[in-house]
Image: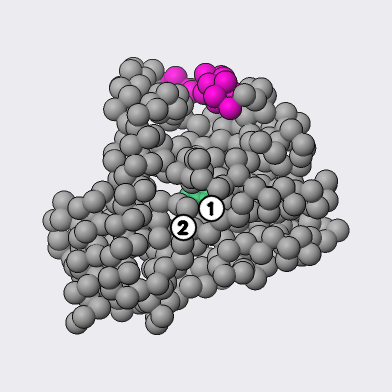
Amino acid sequence: MSCDFLSLAQPGVQKLSPYVPGKPVDELARELDLDPASIVKLASNENPLGPSPKALEAIRAELAELTRYPDGNGFELKSRLAERYSVQADQVTLGNGSNDILELVARAYLAPGLNAVFSAHAFAVYPIATQAVGAQGKVVPAQDYGHDLEAMLAAIDGNTRVVFIANPNNPTGTWFGPQALSDFLARVPQNVLVVLDEAYIEYAEGSELPDGLDYLAQHANLLVSRTFSKAYGLAALRVGYAISSAQIADVLNRVRQPFNVNSLALAAACAALEDIDYLARSRQVNDAGMAQLEAGCRALGLRWIPSKGNFLCIDFARDTTAINQALLRAGVIVRPVAGYGMPDYLRVSIGLPEENARFLAVLAQVLSA
Ligand SMILES: *Cc1c(COP(=O)(O)O)cnc(C)c1O
C-alpha cells in the first residue's frame, strides 16, 4: 500500500498550483507541426533584441573555466552593482534570477503562523514563495488592477513579516508614483520587510516611477529586487539581485545556496551592466513597440491597462480562451492571465516592430472570424 505523498506535503504546498510559464516556441512547433522560425513568442516579457554582444563575448571568455565552481560571493558583479548604484557591496545579494531573491526572503522571514501581504493580480511567485514555507498569503483586492497601497497597509497585522509590492506590476503593468511609495513606507511598521520588486524599472527610467534605491537610506526595512532577465536581455541565465541594508543582506546570505549564480551568468551580467547602448536600444524598442501595440488595439476597438513594463494587458471584455487558441494556431504565443484572476485579458510582451505587426494582423483576423 503506497502512501499519498500529496497529503504528506506541508499544507501550504498542497494548496499551491505550479507556476505556468509562457508556452515555449519548440513546444508549440511540435504540437502544431509548425516551423519554429515562423512562430512569434510575445509571452514571457523577454527582450526581443537578443542578448547584448558584449554579454555573449564575456560568456565565451568564461567557457574554459566551466570545471570550476563560480565565485560564490559574486565579488565582481556585486562590486560593479555597488559602484553603479552608489551603495556598499555588502548591501547587494545576488540571486538565481530575482525569483531566487523572493524565495530567500520567504525562507529567511516567513514560517507557519506568519504571513506576507501582496496584491490581487500581483506576480505569481509571491504566493508560491509564501506558501512553500508554510506561511499565509494575505491577498489584498486591487484598485483598477493596480496595488491599493492603503488597503495593503490596513491588511498588515501582528503576524505580517513581509509585504511584496511590484512597481510596475506584472502582469498588469500598473504602477505607483514617488509620493505613494514614500507615504506607504512611512506607515509600514518597521519590523515588516517591504520587498519592492523592480523587475522592469530600467524601462521606466526618467518617467514618473520612483527609484526604490532612493528610499533605502531612510527605510531599513526596504529591499529592492531587480533582474537581468528583462531590459538586460539575459532571462535564460537566471541572474538578479537585491539591494537592502547590509543586515538584511547578511540574513539572506545565510540561507542562499553557496553557488546560486553560475559563472556564465556572473560574467554576462557584468558585461551587460556596462553595455549602455544595449539598454538604451532596449528602451527605444520598447517605447516604440508600446506605441505600436496601443495604436493597433485602438484601431481594433480594444481597451488595455496602461503599462510601464515591456508588456500590455489587453481587455477583450469576454473570456479569452478561444482567442488565445486561435492565436496559437496562427503561430502567435501570448500569455493568458486567467490564473491571475483576469480571464478576459491577454498579456502581450512588446516585440520587434515586425513581431508586433504580425500579432496585430493575426489578432485582427481572429476577431473578425
Ligand atoms: C520577470 C519578473 C521577475 C523575475 O524574473 P527573474 O527572471 O527571476 O529575475 C520578478 N518580478 C516580476 C514582477 C517579474 O515580472
- Residue 343 position within the rendered picture, expressed as x and y whole percent measured from the top left: 45, 76
Q: Quadrant of residue 304?
A: bottom left
Q: Residues within 10 Å of mark 1 (few under 14, many from 20)?
A: many
- Residue at 65 percent across and 71 percent down: it is 141
- Residue 140 position within the rendered picture, expressed as x and y whole percent measured from the top left: 67, 67
Q: Which residue is mark 2?
A: 307
Q: Amino acid at mark 1?
A: Pro
Residue 273 in the image: above or below residue 292:
above
Q: CA distance from mark 1 to mark 2?
A: 8 Å
153 or 2: nearer the eye?
153
* Residue 42 visible within the image: no
- Residue 251 position within the rendered picture, expressed as x and y whole percent measured from the top left: 73, 35
- Residue at 38 percent across and 41 percent down: it is 283
Residues marked 1 and 2 touching at CB (< 8 Å): yes
Left or right of 233 in this view: 306: right
Q: Amino acid at mark 2?
A: Ser
Q: Which residue is mark 1?
A: 168
Stretch in magenta: 67-85
Say which element carries label 2. loop
